[in-house]
């Protein structure tokens, strides 16, 4: 019994630290994989990593890019104005609005996942960790088999995070 509750956890912690240091994983606060998309098109649909730290910072994206636009389209001359009537210039073609919600799937075996979401952006989150801490905005769980879900009425992003061992942090920035 002593082995099960004292020596086995110590052995697992020592093994985890050795694995992190042996693979050159940065455990001093730096991130191995950093994603900072500047537009909606740059958002990665999937991030899959065995171990390390993953940072996904969405704050550089203008949240208006997530809103459907209503382009006026080209103008046509008024036939009753005559052939020499001035016409309004054609409106520039607006980019296609994205299909919402935009799915993002992050899978990490061992380490830390941090996602920074812009203020005012509606996001749906399902964050799961087998062992560790999960913190999504104002909700958190720690220990084993953690699952924190945040629903939104009209989400612009559908974020799914699966982690084996470590920490998940989703915050506004």
Image: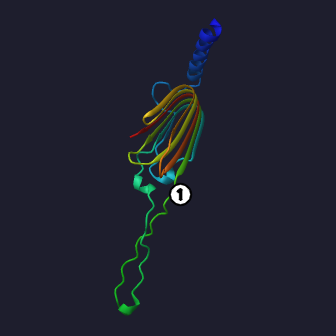
Measuring from the top left, give residue 138's x and y in whole percent.
42, 35
Measuring from the top left, give residue 46's x and y in whole percent.
58, 44
Q: In this picture, is 80 found above or below 25?
A: below
If the image is split into quadrants, where does the C terminus sit?
A: top left
Measuring from the top left, give residue 28's x and y in whole percent.
46, 24
- Residue at image point 54% right, 37% down: 127
In the rendered image, the residue lying farthest to the top is 2
Measuring from the top left, give residue 93's x and y in whole percent.
45, 69
Q: In this picture, is 51 found above or below 66?
A: above
Q: Where is residue 111, by image quadrant?
A: top right
- Residue at image point 46% right, 44% down: 36
Q: In this picture, is 36 found above or below 133?
A: below
State the scheme by which the image is colored: rainbow
Q: Nearer the viewer, residue 32 or 49?
A: 49
Q: Nearer the viewer, residue 1 or 107?
A: 1
Q: In this picture, is 92 found above or below 43?
A: below
As helix, strand or loop, the secondary structure at mark 1 comes to loop
Q: Where is residue 1, by image quadrant?
A: top right
Q: Residues within 10 Å of mark 1 (few under 14, many from 20)?
A: few
- Residue at image point 37% right, 77% down: 89
For disc 1, the marked residue is: 99
Q: Nearer the viewer, residue 23 or 105?
A: 105
The mark tally for this picture is 1
């Amino acid at each position: 019994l002593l082995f099960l509750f004292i020596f086995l956890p110590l052995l697992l912690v020592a093994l985890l630290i050795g694995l992190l240091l042996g693979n050159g994983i940065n455990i001093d606060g730096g991130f191995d994989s950093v994603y900072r998309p500047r537009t909606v098109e740059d958002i990665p649909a999937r991030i899959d990593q065995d171990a390390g730290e993953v940072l996904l910072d969405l704050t550089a994206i203008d949240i208006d890019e997530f809103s459907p636009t209503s382009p006026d389209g080209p103008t046509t001359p008024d036939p009753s104005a005559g052939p020499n009537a001035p016409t309004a210039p054609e409106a520039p073609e607006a980019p296609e609005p994205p299909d919402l919600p935009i799915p993002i799937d992050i899978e990490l075996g061992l380490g830390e996942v941090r996602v920074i979401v812009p203020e005012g952006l509606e996001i749906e989150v399902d964050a799961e960790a087998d062992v560790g801490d999960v913190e999504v905005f104002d909700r958190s769980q720690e220990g084993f088999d953690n699952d924190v879900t945040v629903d939104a009425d009209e989400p612009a992003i559908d974020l799914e995070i699966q982690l084996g061992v470590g920490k998940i942090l989703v915050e506004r920035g």
